[in-house]
Amino acid sequence: MRQPLARRRARYLQIGVPAAVIGSLTGPLAVVPAQADTASIERMQAGPGRIVPATTTPSSYVVQPGDTVSSIARQHGLRTVDVLAWNGLTWRSVIYPGQSLTLSGATAAAPAAPVSVTTAPAGASHVVVSGDTVFGIAQKYGTTVDAVLAANGLTRASVIHPGQSLAVSGASIPAPAPAAAAPLTPPPPAAAQTHVVAAGDTLFGIAQKYGTTTAALFALNGLSSGSIIYPGQSIAVGGAPAAPAAAPAAAPAPAAPSQSSAALDAEQAGNAALIIRIGRQLGVSDRAIAIGLATAMVESSMRNLSWGDRDSLGLFQQRPSTGWGSAEQILDADRSTRVFFGGAGDPNGQATRGLLDIPGWESMRFTDAAQAVQISAYPERYGLWETQAYQWLVQYG
């Protein structure tokens, strides 16, 4: 190894720079621990597009300086997308030295550390330390990721930092609790008062502005901790929570205004026709093709882009650094569409996981099926194009 390269690697390791899901350090440096055995070295040299089964895959792994999720997955013969899913991460998540990652779906599902799970009292908070994730904090306090996000006005794209204080209880309590404690809370806003959502608004911020709670807003508007609000949407912030009783029956109605639509130009229409044609060739269902159309619209506006977030490319914004193929392969719209659908004819083999490789995808929500493939920081966006995707299927199919 040339001396300048060795010195640079030593400097990065001493600093302990946090590694992003796909960092820039491990690619060129290819750090191999001094005590690594031959099998480990062979797995690390296998390259991003190939998965080499590990002799023995441990149930967990402690992140080392310079690690990325993709390098950890590759080292243990796993798919990056599986490691992300098992640990509640997305492609944008950041990992830190000392953080423990689950390397098994079964282990992730089992309560690995039930002893440390506590029932957080009302108003409890957690001070973030190095290596913490929202997923790990939620598990520790016996709550959910969505509840922690809602309680702190965060989204799945938010990054937490050491020293940050997070509320871990209170916001996710069911609606009846605030009703019982109503005499002790600030006077509620006037009856039938509403708030028109502006860009940058969150339910947490709206609740604080009107002296109420996110749980009360959920009840008043028939929402949940996973709901997304949009600029121009009218949110009820006061009045008796009688609306939720009627909300289930009227639930489909609010979905219609939030559905997105677009007229495709010649380039977009050609790509839509290509996705439909390949879906027909593979024998997938109309629903699978519609999911493919909606995903391409969200990720690239139905264009075969030669750029994107980090090294994302193409119709589905697939990344060479996470094993979706070379840049040239990903920019082949025909090939990238087949890789998105996956299944037995996947040109990428077992390196990545397409729609047909997701167990039970047919019974998932439209947006959840797309998210299972893409692992996006904004999972609800795909469902906004569901209605339009079926219309394109008729128009260009």
Image (spheres, helix red, strand yellow):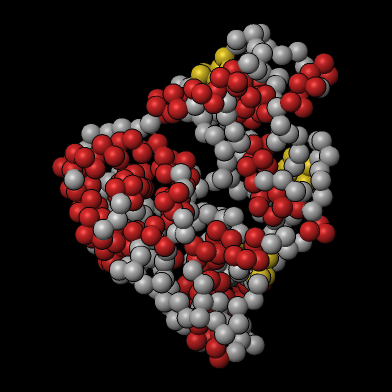
Relative height, residue 239 to residue 124 (above, below): above
Residue 326 is at least partly visible in this image: no
Q: Residue furthest left?
A: 266
Q: In which quarter of the image is residue 342?
A: bottom left
Relative height, residue 213 to residue 137 (above, below): above
At x 82%, y 35%, the residue is 122
* Relative horizontal placement of residue 139, taking residue 31 as reference (left or right): right
Relative height, residue 238 to residue 315 (above, below): above
Q: Where is residue 390 in the image (x, y as percent from the top left)?
A: 29, 39
At x 18%, y 45%, the residue is 397
At x 84%, y 39%, the residue is 121
Q: Where is residue 11 in the image (x, y as percent from the top left)?
A: 61, 72
Q: Position of residue 379 (x, y in %)?
A: 48, 45
At x 41%, y 71%, the residue is 351
* Relative horizontal placement of residue 332, taking residue 313 as reference (left or right): left
* Relative horizontal placement of residue 377, taking residue 207 as reference (left or right): left
* Relative horizontal placement of residue 332, taking residue 291 as reference (left or right): left
Residue 273 is at least partly visible in this image: yes
Q: Which residue lies furthest to the bottom in this view?
A: 38
Q: Position of residue 56 (x, y in %)?
A: 60, 82
In terms of depth relative to the viewer, which is nearer, 382 or 175? 175
Total numbered badges shown on the rendered structure:
0
